[in-house]
């Protein structure tokens, strides 16, 4: 299923169903929750600080010496 099919299906739904779908996605997925929170309240300064801390912790951990490259790349993306 591609994005075109998803868009057509979403266009057929009414507002109540779309709100219910977004609420369900919000409660199930952390990445979706962060995206929707930023969409509703775009605080770029807080997002920059949070991502910077995650990247710093991934590459320069406070405890131990384990480099977590995957987490650093994920935070950058």
Image (tube, rainbow, N blue to C red):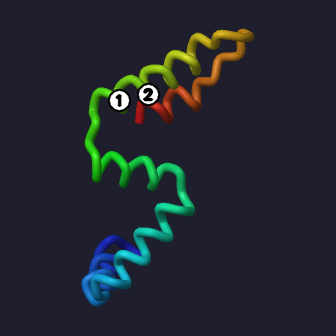
Q: Position of residue 34 (x, y in %)?
A: 43, 47
Instruction: Specify few, some or many for label 2: CA neighbours under 10 Å numbering under 14, 14-19, or 20 or more.
Output: few
Question: For mark 2, what is the residue?
Answer: 50
Q: Mark on residue 23? A: none
Q: State whether residue 60 is above or below residue 53.
A: above
Q: State whether residue 51 is above or below residue 22.
A: above
Farthest residue, direction front: 41
Relative side of 31 to 18, left or right: right
Residue drawn 41% across the image and 36% down it: 77
Write down the quadrant of residue 69 in the picture.
top right
Write down the quadrant of residue 17 in the picture.
bottom left
Instruction: Specify few, some or many for label 1: CA neighbours under 10 Å numbering under 14, 14-19, or 20 or more.
Output: few
Residue drawn 26% across the image and 42% down it: 42
> In terms of secondary structure, where does tag 2 sit?
helix
Q: Position of residue 4 (x, y in %)?
A: 29, 76
Write down the quadrant of residue 61 in the picture.
top right
Relative side of 15 to 31, left or right: left
> In terms of secondary structure, where does tag 1 sit?
helix
> What's the CA distance linking mark 2 and mark 1?
6 Å
Q: Position of residue 5 (x, y in %)?
A: 33, 80
Q: Mark on residue 46? A: 1
Q: State whether residue 24 is above or below residue 30.
A: below
Q: State whether residue 34 is above or below residue 67.
A: below
Residue drawn 28% across the image and 46% down it: 41
Relative side of 55 to 13, left or right: right
Q: Position of residue 58 (x, y in %)?
A: 58, 21
The image shows a total of numbered marks equal to: 2
Residues at marks 2 and 1 touching, judged by CB atoms closer than 8 Å:
yes
Residue drawn 35% across the image and 29% down it: 46
User: Residue 60 versus residue 42: which sits nearer the camera?
Assistant: 42
């Amino acid at each position: 299923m591609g994005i075109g099919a998803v868009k057509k299906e979403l266009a057929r739904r009414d507002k109540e169903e779309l709100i219910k779908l977004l609420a369900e996605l919000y409660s199930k997925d952390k990445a979706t929750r962060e995206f929707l929170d930023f969409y509703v309240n775009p605080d770029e300064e807080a997002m920059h600080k949070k991502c910077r801390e995650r990247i710093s912790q991934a590459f320069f951990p406070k405890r131990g010496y384990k480099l977590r490259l995957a987490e650093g790349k994920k935070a950058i993306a």
